Amino acid sequence: MLPLAGVVIFSDMTDRRYDDDEIAAIFGAAAESPQSSQSSLQRTATGQGLTLAELQAIGREVGISPDAVAEAAQTVDVRRAAVSRKFLGLPIGVERSVTLSRRLTDEEWERLVVELREVFKARGRTHSDGSLRQWTNGNLYALLEPVTAGHRLRFGSLYGAARARITAGVAAVGAAVVVALTSAAGGHLGGSVSGIAVLGVAGLAMAGIGALQLPGWARLRGRQMEALAARLALSIGSPDTPPAIPPPH
């Protein structure tokens, strides 16, 4: 895991104010217990928004570390720029990105690859082309791209197996309907009912299984990518990194 030490402070983020929904998400992610989260929310639901410094101060009072609040706030910022691909209204692909204030060193990239393998339980493959770097494992990828400010890191994944399962299921149901109509037109529907039923039920089951898998998969992948992006942004620094607030002496 990349360390959070040496967080870069960007003064232009000092005035960033989080609304009540964002505050709920921040304390929900940062709090170690639901009781701490509820206590914090009761004190922060003002309708006017609060800065990270104010959230960290309140968090300290209920036992939530400033680092945990800062990481949760960065996660919220990453989530705001989330990209989701849809298939028949279902989340078939997710992507998260973060822009870093400087370029990663070779050692930092190698440590990130190690963490990617641990988080996603996949060895994957790395490839470099000049300053472009990537780690891929099937439809799962992490791309490190040079930008003016430093590096942009993009995580993404596509659940191709679920899409194929849904497509095959819908095709099977469609085939069952065509066979039923053709048999009815030829006066042979009675002898084909059992086969049509089996084909239709199998298609519905296949499509249903694929559809049920997608929401949970999308939430899991989104959380994994947001956590990785937030930790990296706090460790390396980014134009969107909230300022770190040191604990009182």
Image (cartoon, grey):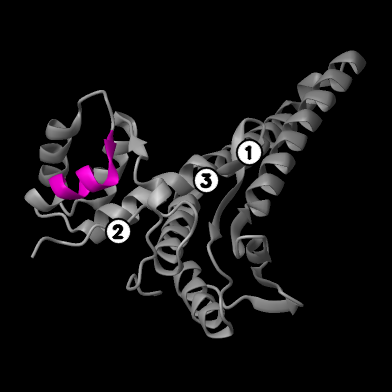
| Depicted 119 relative to depicted 53: above or below | below
Residue holding disc 3: 213
Label 2 packing within 10 angstroms: few (<14), some (14-19), many (20+):
many
Label 2: element kind? loop
Quarter of the figure that contains the N terminus: bottom left
Residue 165 is situated, as x and y percent measured from the top left of the image, at 67, 46
Residue at the location (67% across, 71% down)?
134
Kind of residue indicated by mark 1: Ala
Kindly report the distance in space between the C-alpha atoms of the residues bearing marks 2 and 3.
38 Å
Residue 120 numbered tag? none
Residue 76 is situated, as x and y percent measured from the top left of the image, at 40, 45
Label 1 packing within 10 angstroms: few (<14), some (14-19), many (20+):
many
Q: Is residue 19 left or right of residue 153?
A: left
Kindly report the distance in space between the C-alpha atoms of the residues bearing marks 2 and 1.
47 Å
**Sequence-first disc among 2 and 1:** 1
Kind of residue indicated by mark 2: Ala
Label 3: element kind? helix
Label 3 packing within 10 angstroms: few (<14), some (14-19), many (20+):
some
Residue 57: within the magenta?
yes
* Span of residues in magenta: 50-58
Is residue 216 visible to us here? no
Quarter of the figure that contains the C terminus: bottom left
Q: Do the residues labelled 2 and 1 touch (CB within 8 Å)?
A: no
**Sequence-first disc among 2 and 3:** 3
The answer to which of 218 and 29 lies nearer the viewer is: 29
The mark lying in front, picked from 2 and 3, is: 2
**Sequence-first disc among 3 and 1:** 1
Residue holding disc 1: 207
Is residue 79 visible to us here? yes
Residue holding disc 2: 244
